[in-house]
Amino acid sequence: MKICVLIKQVPDQESVLKINSEETWVVEDNLVFTTNESDTYALEEALLLKESVGGEVVVCTLGPERSSQALKDALAKGADRALFMQDEIFDQLDSQGTARVIAQALREEQFDLILTGLQADDTGDAQLGPMLAEELDRPHVTLVVETELLNGGLKVKQELEGGWFQHIEIDLPALLTIQSGINKPRYASLRGIMAMKSKEIKQITAQDMGLDTSSLIPYHVVKRLYVPPKTKETTFLEGTPDEVVEQLVQRLTNEAKVL
Amino acid sequence: MGKVLAFLQHLDGKVSRNSLEALKGAQELAAAEGHSLTGVVLGVDTAPTELSAIHMDELLLVSSPELANYSSEYYVAAMQAVLAAETPELLIAGHTYQARDWLPRLAYRLGRPLVSDCVGYHQDSDLRWVRQIFQGKISADVETTPGLVIISFQSGAFRSDDLAEGKPAIRTMDVDLSGVPLRVRPGERFQEAKGAVDLSRAERIIAVGRGIGEEENLTMIRELAGALGAELGSSRPVVDYGWLPQDHQIGSSGQTVTPKLYLAVGVSGAIQHQVGMKNSDCIVAINKDPNAPIFEIADYGIVANLLDIVPRLAATLKERQGD
Ligand SMILES: Cc1cc2nc3c(=O)[nH]c(=O)nc-3n(C[C@H](O)[C@H](O)[C@H](O)COP(=O)(O)OP(=O)(O)OC[C@H]3O[C@@H](n4cnc5c(N)ncnc54)[C@H](O)[C@@H]3O)c2cc1C
Ligand SMILES: Nc1ncnc2c1ncn2[C@@H]1O[C@H](COP(=O)(O)O)[C@@H](O)[C@H]1O
């Protein structure tokens, strides 16, 4: 089975974010970047599927130079090779443009299965997977928490709201967006890290793909970023840990009356 | 005058709450822009009763045998036909799990923008959509190119109690989906065998998040829970890591709780967590990050390392009980 995993590099969850002076993005200089959380689960699912039926796992990202690290991490965990779409012209892409460009690079590879995370933790669009499936004219299922291979197809478990689930059968080739918790992502082994160094990372530019860049004008543009205005008055308790605990117990007893 | 379409998701004759909240947004936008408002329900030929008393110019019931149950391929094709016939300025939906599944595909097919998970909009000279990025830590104002725009509104972006009342005219529309290939075949919906933990009736809950750092720290949390007489709940990552079973998870894909006291420890307060606990009477958050979104909804906040606070709090509460 030939599987592609899309991964995006995003700022670490613990990052302290600062908005840039143009108010269009965050200042990236001091940020630590990591692989988007749900994408790590997608990669693990691909590696497990490969281990059970054989085949190839190809990881793919579109992003700036720094994001090659996310590909290297995936190769060290056991992915076979990587596609790295990098071009200045890609900086302004929205979900639709990203889907169009990635589809162009994946089309000739003829993957049986494409896995993505369910949403990127930075922009939170939750759009790329279904859009890519549409461009490649293949079926998709989102929010997948279990996969099982059938003859010629796939049975997946989809998470619904409020603790409900649903099994879905889907024809291959297909695209799935993977929800966190589906498996336990592995760590890279020392051997894996050594092996990574000899694995291929194929660089692809807009020109390499023969892309008509005029079709990549974004449909939506971020005009301004800002810190969300506070809507509720939180009473912050301050002091040493002992003082804070004392205040909290007092407040919960006398003010909120919940103790 | 243009038109606003509001998509109304339903199950077993009931409209999703998130759809009704988005419908309130659609009412406001239609009024502000001088547009008419049409509610759209797929897969029924009688309207869900609750819709008959809500202000909409009309309610469009779209039927076809293929729409009896949700499927992304049929929904996209049906809505494509509806949009072609109705040519609205805006299509508005709730940002439900179902909307996540099919709206991006629809937007891509139409070559139109989808601004997902919006929390509101500004109307200055241009219409700007407000959405949150970086898991609620930053807000973004977004503008789109002219023409049809698809918007999904986050749960809680508007209040369904505020819906204007009225009596929509009912219109029906048939769509022919016989040519659409069915490559995705959903089965029945089900719930996992219910575990022992029902948090919906708990009076006090301590919810632990990824901020506890390691599984071993649960011991200290359990001690606090004992001293407080509280049940243990958690955010999603704690369940994903296998530190607590799934039936402890609180949020959009877990339980919804309304205790008298909700103590969030090392929980950032992402929207998917908030929807499961924001109606608690008293919310206390302990988090080392003063900008964590949980403080948006907390009554009391403690900005500190939870390892410094939790054991002391447990000890103080135990002492009190000893008195
Ligand atoms: C479709 C979908 C469904 C989802 N369903 C759910 C759901 O049902 N429930 C749910 O909870 N999430 C759900 N999520 C995930 C959600 O988006 C967040 O990722 C998740 O809630 C974050 O969990 P957290 O707060 O524990 O972790 P994080 O966001 O990583 O936050 C950890 C917090 O701990 C703080 N911290 C770290 N160390 C310390 C310390 N020593 N002392 C004090 N504070 C510390 C940090 O400042 C941070 O704020 C869902 C997501 C999606 C996309
Ligand atoms: N630039 C990118 N390169 C590779 N994969 C991406 C990129 N952006 C998004 N994805 C994938 O699409 C998923 C959903 O992202 P989004 O629609 O942006 O929220 C992510 O979890 C990734 O798997």
Image (cartoon, helix red, strand yellow):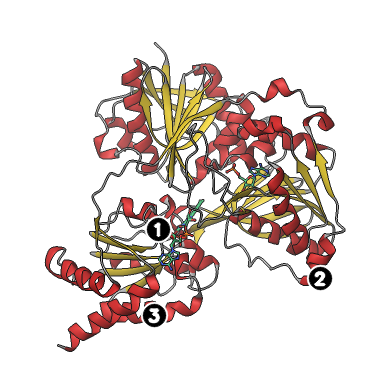
Any atom of ligand 1 within 8 Å of the CB at mark 1? yes
* Label 2 – label 3 distance at C-alpha: 37 Å
Q: Which of pointers 1 and 3 lies earlier in the amino acid sequence?
A: 3
Pointer 1 chain = B
**Image quadrant where residue B241 sits:** bottom right
Q: Kindly give the residue lying farthest to the right in the view shown.
A: A198
- Estimate the x, y position of residue A21 in percent, counting from the top left: 48, 34
SS class, disc 1: loop
Quadrant hosting ligand 2: top right
The answer to whether one can see residue A136 in this image is no
- Estimate the x, y position of residue A234 in percent, counting from the top left: 25, 54
What amino acid does circle 1 point to? Asp
Query: Can you say whether A15 is above or below B127 in the image?
Result: below
Q: Which residue is drawn at 47% across and 49% down?
A: B135
Pointer 2 chain = A
Any atom of ligand 2 within 8 Å of the CB at mark 2? no
Q: Kindly give the residue lying farthest to the top in the view shown.
A: B1
Q: Which residue is drawn at 42% across and 81% down?
A: B219
* Label 1 – label 2 distance at C-alpha: 37 Å
Which residue is disc 2 drawn over?
A191
Which residue is disc 3 drawn over?
B220
Q: Kindly give the residue lying farthest to the left in the view shown.
A: A254
The answer to whether one can see residue B298 in this image is yes
Which residue is disc 1 drawn over?
B289
Q: In which quarter of the image is the N terminus of chain B?
A: top left
Q: Residue at x 29, y 72 (%)?
A: A241
Q: Is residue B301 left or right of residue B60?
A: left
Pointer 3 chain = B
